[in-house]
Amino acid sequence: MAAKVGIFAAILLVCAILLPLLASSCPNHRPEFLEHDSSKTDITIHGDNNNVVHANVNDIAIPSSNYETRNERSLKEKKKSNKNKNKNKNKKNKKEMKSHEHGFEAFNFEHPLIGGGHHGYPHVFPGYNVDPITEEHEQLEILGGLREGFYQNTCPQAEQIIKNGLTRAFQNDSTIAAAIPRLFLHDCFVKGCDGSIFLDTTPSGGKVEKLSPSNGVTVKGFELIDEIKAELEENCPGIVSCSDVLAYLSRDAFVASGLPHYEVSGGRRDGMESRVENVVGNLPLPDDTVDQMIQLFNRKGLNAEDLVVLIGAHSIGVAHCFNFLYRMDTPEKAQMVDPRLGGVMKFTCTSQMSTIAFDATTQYKMDSVFYKQLLMKKGLLESDQVLTQDIRTRGFVQRFSNDEVGWFNKFGVAMNKLGAVEVLTGNQGEIRKQCRAINL
């Protein structure tokens, strides 16, 4: 019994000697943890032996887990790929597709606090990033899908052919410059910019738009359209629509009259219907009130400023006497006419079909003189003159009369808005072979 007690005492003695030595060589490893207030950049770290260290969040390196190790490798591969992307784009594309197939390895995630990570969501699938909304996209939406340079690949000479046609016609008859934009507005405001005003007949056999009293003898330029369209068909058969011909031609007419060049969007297709009934209520009339004109323009997606801007097209061209002579027959209306202009009206209008220039001072030049004349009660049309009487439009008339460059800048924009009214695009409508008839 005494021997057993001795052995037990020896074991206790050995433990008493060895345990302190083992404890000194194996310190207590307590797990690290972070105390962090999101409003502060300093972090308190509790580590071994209750030591406390204060560090800045950006100076901390967190040990990588297996997931983070894979992610770090993905980041390195991405940097390497970006470095060489200009040398081998095809190789990069294959690598991205491979990443998509490997699930989480396609993630490019950086901690939002540690390591200077990106704000917001990580880029998960690089090949499926949503394109940001740009000014170009917004403009495409406003213009109904039309775009500049539409024929650059399919008929690169189209715009030049159209411009050359206008130049030849303008040299022979300078009044064509005002006639073409009038056709454009009368086409676009009636069932959209679809070239329907050109049609002589339709399968239904009814009367067409060009026979409306609002058109008739007051519109011209059809022969020029025919000539240009024939040349386009010879060079690029079945490519350029009649409605686009009119849009580009209107721009060229204004430029020939002194307006700075502006880009025109293309992509319209031609309609297959033209009915005289569609004209009623869709075109401005010479005795319209400001309310009536603003309501009409609003229905077409245009506002009061667009109305005043586009009325400036009357800087060139002429008006027929039956559109304004009635003003002198009513004392109240006659008071809105400058007396000298009233005398010219009576002297010149020997018949209802006689004409007077909207702007006799610079009849063939696009300039701000027209707006100045409106402010002096020298507007031929009542619908033009009343724009100086209404608070919604008078300010625009005054501004453009003193800021010709500002008006020029707004004019091209307004014309493109006009050219986007109810357009046919894509597979809608057709590309007519001849502008006067639909394809058979």
Image (cartoon, grey):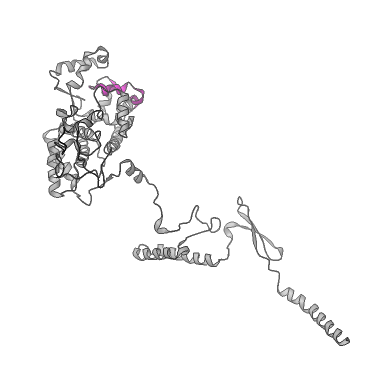
In the rendered image, the residue lying farthest to the left is 172
Q: Hey, which quadrant is residue 128 in on the image? A: bottom left
Q: How many marks?
A: 0
Residue 377 within the magenta-colored segment of the rendering: yes
Q: Residue at x 48, y 56 (%)?
A: 122
In the rendered image, the residue lying farthest to the front is 204
Does residue 340 appear in the picture of this structure? no
Q: Is residue 306 left or right of residue 25?
A: left
Image location of residue 112, percent across then percent down: 53, 55
Image location of residue 313, percent across then percent down: 24, 30
Image location of residue 335, percent across then percent down: 27, 14
Does residue 345 appear in the picture of this structure? yes
Depth check, front residue: 330 or 344: 330
Depth check, front residue: 386 or 360: 386
In this rendering, the answer to whether 390 lies above or below 306 is above
Q: Residue at x 51, y 56 (%)?
A: 117
Please give the range of residues in magenta. 373-395
Q: Hey, which quadrant is residue 184 in on the image? A: top left
Depth check, front residue: 42 or 162: 162
Image location of residue 133, percent across then percent down: 39, 47
Residue 271 within the magenta-colored segment of the rendering: no
Q: Is residue 100 left or right of residue 17?
A: left
